Amino acid sequence: MSADDLTPRQTEDVLHREVRAPSDESERGPGGERLQHAEAASKPIRADAPREPQPRGAKVRGNRPIDQAEAAERFLAAPLHQKAHDERLWDVRRKRDVAAHGIPEWEELRELASQIKTHTLTHLDHYLEQFEAAAKANGVHVHWAEDGAAHNRIVLDILKKHGAKSLVKSKSMLTEECGFRHFMAANDIAVIETDLGERIQQLDEEEPSHVVMPAVHKTRLDVAEVFARTLGTDPDNDDAHYLAESQRETTRPLILQADAGLTGCNFAIAETGTVVTCTNEGNADLSGNVPPLQIHSIGIEKLIPKVEHLGVFIRLLSRSALGSPITQYTSHFRGPRAGTEMHMVLVDNGRSERLAMEEFWTSLKCIRCGACMNTCPVYRRSGGLSYGATYSGPIGLIIDPTFNKRKYSTLPFSSTMNGSCTNVCPVKINIHEQIFAWRKVLAEEHRIPLLKQGMMKAAGAVLSRPAAYRAAIQTADSALRVLPRFAVYNPANTWGKKREMPHAPRQSFHAWYRQNRMKKETDA
Amino acid sequence: MSARDAILSRLRANRPAGDFPLPEVPAFAPLVGDDLVAEFTERLAKMGGRVEAAGGPADPFAPVRHRLNGAAVIASAVPELSGNRDLATVRKPGDLADVDVAVVRARFGVAETGSVLFTEGDLIVNSVAYLAQHLIVLLDPADLVVNIQAAYRRPEFGQAAYAVLHTGPSATADIEGVLIHGAQGVRSLTVLLLPRGVLPRGAQEA
């Protein structure tokens, strides 16, 4: 299989001239050099006036299948947003490549990470028991939640016991999965997101569109509009520093007054009972260290056996996510502060069931870096909200149907099957193969007739690159049986409409990857 | 059945077939040269931090004196400098919100990433490292380890209630990729290379 059609030329600096910024506001280092750490763009990108309304996400109608193609159409109809989004994420993807090529043992690290995760997942009962015992020995209260509703109830109980009415939290995809904010709002608990991107999304009453950069689909003009409406900032001031500072100044009092703090978890270490968070803003540390009550929500698949394994995962995570060697803060929460309580909630929410799915259980290896999203041509051109699900992009296509097979039955078709997601995955999940396997499952379970509107709209259209598609599906009898129907009705064409054909590379992704890796190994 | 037992029994029942041993993690060759201070300095600078050599015996803090002089509230967790906010008597963590400059000592530094590590013992009050506007970090060059792998062999991670690696100041680029320091935490992080046990004359007398 090849990704010939999908990798813009490496040498080309700018994908879209329209979003090239004339000036630069980013921070600089001691020698005046432009800094590029955290999620900083390597060059200024700006979706400038005229003001273009922000395209909104997929229309969610209860349990009915999400029409991702329809939402993608609307994203494409907002060219400044679409181009800024594409430019920004492709830039992050390129930063990832540079960071990965800087480490001779990169491929070995990916293999180790994959094996450590696979081992842990197949011995998860043992490691969870070990984690629980260690945490309890550290003086931590450990809770178990079978699903998202149970997680929310457990946290509410803890808050009620302490008379807590407000909670500051750092970004956590698990709590998004659980519908945590909505549940707490209904129970009169004020929840305040402290990550800037997540706060923007909360104030705009939108879900995060990306696992690492929640507001990456918004331009500064959108943020200025949201902050003017919710924080009372100057609607005509779209300076990024002004906007970020306004958020800092308005959030800090809420952090200082909060009754409780909650963080998610990037890694949970079985041998020590430690929760590890990786952030750039330090907001997980504020959430964990300022309020008198501390809660950590942990997806059970986050377990790793030992501290030494962080030496593998920390090197992979931020490089894969943002092209940065490490996040600004790597925090290890192991025991309560003197005089306070620390609670850890271990959440299943479908993970133990997914373990039984022969073709899909390895998706549990995911460390939520977002590299597969940044590299995905469909994601970059349609925005994370078009998926109408907690997890978007390639990893979303294979995780979301495990939560709701009907609602997310269309998502596995939102792929061009180029395989780039699999190639950048730091824990070597065979994402594109699982996408295809889901198509088979959904076809065999007759979920396909449920697809309507969005797919029908694309009827009669041809895939923009049928060769790549054919190569991806050359095996599997049951697939071949249903192929003609997919090939005709595939909504992938929606994104092909605005694809930048001149960016077709001179060499295949694999050829390019080999060449670059070999060059790097020679350099080393 | 409790939620705990239900989850554990599902995990046992659903365990994928096959043998998946835990791999040995080899010790990778360091990616940095022998001059750990130079490597640390270069890498921290790329992450938005600064490194300064300590001043002379009269005033080891000379390179950061301008920052200290401009501060109304200084919280010091180190014997080398006395601030005007006593961390030992802080009632609640939020009380440190008015601190302009916090001075703390790193347990160790990591050359490969430009990171410094603190535990709750080093910070006295954890929140000071985030609520202060600026952070000054004392680091003994002898306390540099070569890479992240070496860092995770240190005992702090199995002993401390809280251990945190700082690699530069608080940062965000959530708005159109524009890099901004001081998103929620400190606006700047400056490492002063000062060996342990070198007290300035004034501090020694006191």
Image: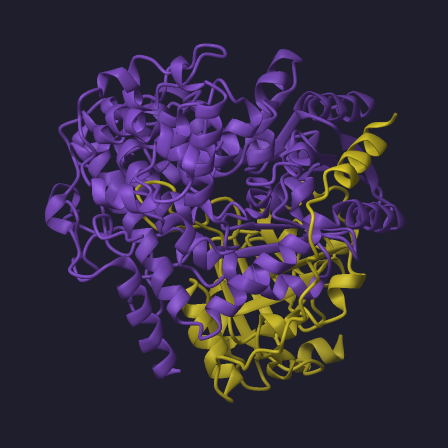
Chain colored yellow: B
Question: Which color scheme did the rendering employ for the protein?
Answer: by chain
Q: Position of residue A140 (x, y in %)?
A: 83, 43
Q: Position of residue A202 (x, y in %)?
A: 47, 25
Tell me if residue A22 comes above or below residue A387 in the rendering: below
The C terminus of chain A appears in which quarter of the rendering? Answer: bottom left
Q: Nearer the viewer, residue A268 or A376?
A: A376
At horizontal 35% and vertical 61% (from top left) the residue drawn is A97
At horizontal 60% and vertical 79% (from top left) the residue drawn is B194
Q: Position of residue A238 (x, y in %)?
A: 26, 34
- In the image, A351: left or right of B133? right
Q: Is residue A293 visible?
A: no
At horizontal 69% and vertical 35% (from top left) the residue drawn is A352
- In the image, A391: left or right of A58? right
Q: Residue furthest bottom?
A: B34
- In the image, A301: left or right of A70? right
Chain A rendering hue: purple
Q: Nearer the viewer, residue A324 or A311?
A: A311
Q: Nearer the viewer, residue A451 or A72?
A: A451
Q: Nearer the viewer, residue B50 or B43?
A: B43
Q: Position of residue B95 (x, y in %)?
A: 67, 42
Tell me if residue A200 comes above or below residue B69 in the rendering: above
Q: Is residue B145 visible?
A: yes
Q: How many marks?
A: 0
